[in-house]
Image (tube, helix red, strand yellow):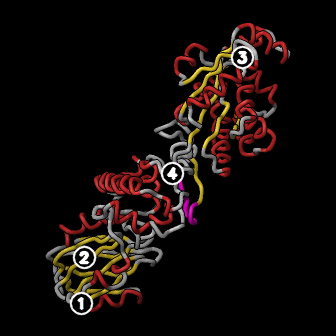
Amino acid sequence: MPELPEVETVKNKLSPLIVGKKIIDVDVRYPKYECLNQIKGETIEGIKRRGKFLIFVLTNHYVVSHLRMEGKYFTSKNERVNKHDLVKFTLDDSFMYYNDVRKFGVFNCFNRNDDIDNLEPLSKVGLEPFNASKEYLFDKLNSHTEPIKTALLDQSIISGLGNIYVDEVLYKSRINPFRKACDISINECDEIIKNSIDTLNDAIALGGSTIKSFASLNGESGHFQGSLLVHLRENERCYRCNNYIIKSRCGGRGTYYCPACERLIKDSKYYAITGGFSSGKSTVLKMIKDLGYTTYSLDEIYNELFLNKKEMLKEINKAFNTTEKSKLREIVFNSKEKNDILKEITHKYVMKELFSRIESNKDRICFVEAPLLYEGGFEKCFDKVITVDESIEVLETLLKNKGFTLDDYNTRNNSQMDKKEKINRSDYVIHNDKDLNNLLKQVKELLIKLEV
């Protein structure tokens, strides 16, 4: 369905071609639009827009047009034949056609003396972002318990935004589409208004978005779809945090968002724990869990998905012709390119599963063990990064307990970022160089610093 930028584009392109022209005749070819027969002989004095409605200002009437799913206008100096042209307007020196494949478009005719803003359908249309204040939006949302995306799609609350632009606006505003509308703060309303205005203006400048069937005047496509930040970008990396964009359903509408940037729980905190192979990350994570905090391990999620995630296994098999871990290790061992391909496939599913669990559990605070945090480029998904730095003595003990040698350690670490670089890029470092009591003491001190 055309949204505000698309309708504004139609208005801007149509105006110079028909304003000032007289309607010599109207050929209504679909009974639904018979009200248009009464405008014969009138002059088109102007075209306005309200939300997603076009308003033709005539000598004696207003004609309010809503394009719905497939409505389009065409102009021509010569007559044309098209079975989906439902109305032909004969003007002074040209023709205008209303074309609608699905016949969902709507026309309403009013007398020029009518106060159309107080008559349906326009009486149900809320303010546009261009005219709305943060206070107006906050007041409108205050009594709505449905998701904020559903509320913003409600044209009686705020007009002009549809599925495409609500996704974009919420992404820019860092607001999860499933948050309750009534929980949106007045400052967040301010962000929504500002980002709506910016997004709509950018889209208007590029002639709107042509994703499925929208075309402005005479079938011309829009170009804003090439500038979309989140909509239609499922499984692609977020431009802001490098996480993966997911697609879900919100109020029955396909919804695209980044769960790391657009958090379901406002002011939530996600902390990553990383380090080299056998550095003690899992021990630190267990200590944090035992102290009562929610924890996740990306390695554990990975192993679970390898057992039951058919989509991931199908994608791996397509790329490597096997899903056996031992064979995959052999394939990627000496090939950085193939190793990167495997990581990109598995990281996508692991990170999506992680944030699915965080959202399902409505976690306000959680700690995530992420061995390949920097290698996967996921550090910006988290508020703080904690690196566990082990001493050589502790490392040798940990390796021995796991049945590994230093050669095994060096082999595994070859594909990982240098430990010193991890430490330099981290917010906090836990030194695993003494006994478990000392390690637990550092964990407790860190939790105090994090004020959790």
| Amino acid identity at mark 1 | Asn
Q: Earlier in the sequence, mark 2 or mark 1?
A: 2
Q: Which mark is residue 111?
A: 1
Q: x, y percentage for residue 179?
A: 54, 57
Q: Residues within 10 Å of mark 4 (few under 14, many from 20)?
A: some
Q: Earlier in the sequence, mark 2 or mark 3?
A: 2
Identify the residue at horizontal 42%, vertical 49% (top origin): 173
x and y, in percent, of residue 369 in the image: 67, 31
The reply to whether the C-beta atoms of the residues labelled 4 and 2 are less than 8 Å apart is no
**Tag in front: 4 or 2:** 4
Please, is residue 301 above or below residue 163 in the view? above
Residue 224 image point, x, y percent? 37, 51
N-term-proximal mark, 4 vs 1: 1
Q: Which residue is mark 3?
A: 412
Q: Report the mark closest to the observer, 2 or 3.
A: 3
Tell me the residue that label 2 is attached to. 95
What residue sits 39% from the left and 67% below the top?
Answer: 139
Q: Amino acid at mark 4?
A: Leu
**Residue 60, placed above or below residue 370:** below
Q: CA distance from mark 2 to mark 1?
A: 24 Å
Q: Earlier in the sequence, mark 4 or mark 3?
A: 4
Is mark 2 in CB contact (under 8 Å) with mark 1? no
Residue lying at the far left in this picture: please name it.
Answer: 20
Image location (x, y in percent) of residue 136: 34, 66
* Local crowd size for mark 1, using a 10 Å CA cut-off: few (<14), some (14–19), many (≥20): few
Q: CA gap, disc 4 to disc 2?
A: 37 Å
Q: Say few, some or many: other residues with alpha carbon within 10 Å of mark 3 (under 14 / 14 to 19 / 20 or more).
A: few
How far apart are the two marked residues, 2 and 3, measured between alpha carbons? Answer: 72 Å
Magenta segment, which residues?
250-257
| Quarter of the figure with the C terminus | top right
- The answer to whether 165 is drawn above or below residue 260 in the figure is below
Occupied quadrant, residue 339: top right
